[in-house]
Amino acid sequence: EFQLSVVGKDKEGNESNVLEARIFVQAGQEDLPPEIVNVTVPETVAADSSFDFVVTAEVTDPDGPQDVQRVIYQFFPPAHPTPTQEDTLVDDGTGADAVAGDGVYTAVLSSNLIRTASDYFLRFQAEDRAGSKSAARIATIRGVFRLPQAPVLSNLVAPDTVQIDPTRVVQILLTVDVFDPQGLSDIDFVRFRSFLPNGQEAKDSPFELSDDGNRAVSGDEVAGDGTYSIIVNLPPNGVTPGDFRFVFQAKDKSGLLSNTIEHIMTVIQ
């Protein structure tokens, strides 16, 4: 039992009447938050499949298992700051949950959440009846492909018209973005074929693009970012003006070819 007295005093030193109150402290324990002691998720999930997979979180609470109010998970795709799915895990012995009340909470997720060969993240957190939350636990699932998938080209950057300069070589930068579901390490090459205004293929065609970060040689800005680049030199003489047709394509290490992107570049005198 505590006695609380409150009195006020003004700047002249005059005191107010006193208000008193008694505070009774009852015996009890401090509410302690739950703890997630272990989580289980599959190491890999096939992105080119359709099935359900199970995740679990083992939870303890100093105030007893009955004090756990809920256990939630949040699902984060690669480079995604906010979860795209959030739900509760259960410990009721139904569905995929083996034993009710054993402290192992279970949820079933669909492999449709996994779409690329990248790392996906699950965040688990438990909360008790008083609202106290456990420290979060993070688990990683790696998306994989059972069957090889072809690379994809996009976002070609190339000029529509280039003028010959009789006093110097004109350098033309061409870039294209490449995506491979198995990762960029699966890319064998990215090339383009060049066809002259008369329809014949250029003598040294095809030409290979690079993702090496060698700005001076290939024109590539950042190595390994999936943007492939090449510098084409247009000499001051010896080139017939007209429409040049470029056909871009990539191939992966399993031999699969990407889509093609065609571009017409008109060379004028």
Image (cartoon, helix red, strand yellow):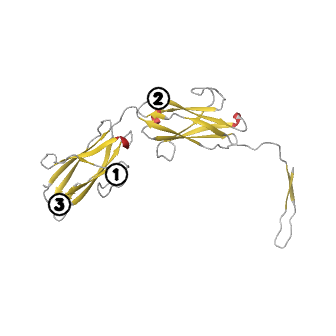
Residue indicated by mark 2: 51
Pointer 1 local density, CA inside 10 Å: few below 14, some 14–19, many at least 20? some
**Do labels 3 and 2 touch, CB within 8 Å?**
no
Front: mark 1 or 3 = 1
As measured in the structure, the alpha-carbon distance from the residue carrying label 1 to the one carrying label 3 is 28 Å
Front: mark 1 or 2 = 1
- Circle 3 — which element? loop
Residue indicated by mark 3: 164
Q: Is residue 191 above or below residue 106?
A: below
Query: Image point 63% across, 26% down: which residue?
Result: 99
Sequence-earlier tag: 1 or 3: 3
Pointer 3 local density, CA inside 10 Å: few below 14, some 14–19, many at least 20? some
Q: Is residue 184 above or below residue 55?
A: below
Q: Is residue 95 left or right of residue 142?
A: right
Which quadrant of the rendered structure holds the C terminus? bottom left
Q: Is residue 190 above or below residue 213?
A: above
Pointer 2 local density, CA inside 10 Å: few below 14, some 14–19, many at least 20? few
Sequence-earlier tag: 1 or 2: 2
- Circle 1 — which element? loop
Position in image of residue 200 (x %, y %): 13, 45
As measured in the structure, the alpha-carbon distance from the residue carrying label 1 to the one carrying label 2 is 39 Å
Position in image of residue 24 (x %, y %): 85, 48
Q: Nearer the viewer, residue 212 or 3?
A: 212
Query: Looking at the rendered structure, which numbered label has been put on residue 212?
Result: 1
Q: Is residue 266 left or right of residue 129?
A: left
Q: Quadrant of residue 214?
A: bottom left
As measured in the structure, the alpha-carbon distance from the residue carrying label 3 to the one carrying label 2 is 58 Å
Q: Amino acid at mark 3?
A: Ile
Q: Amino acid at mark 1?
A: Asp
How many labels, in total? 3
Q: Quadrant of residue 186?
A: top left
Q: Amino acid at mark 2?
A: Phe
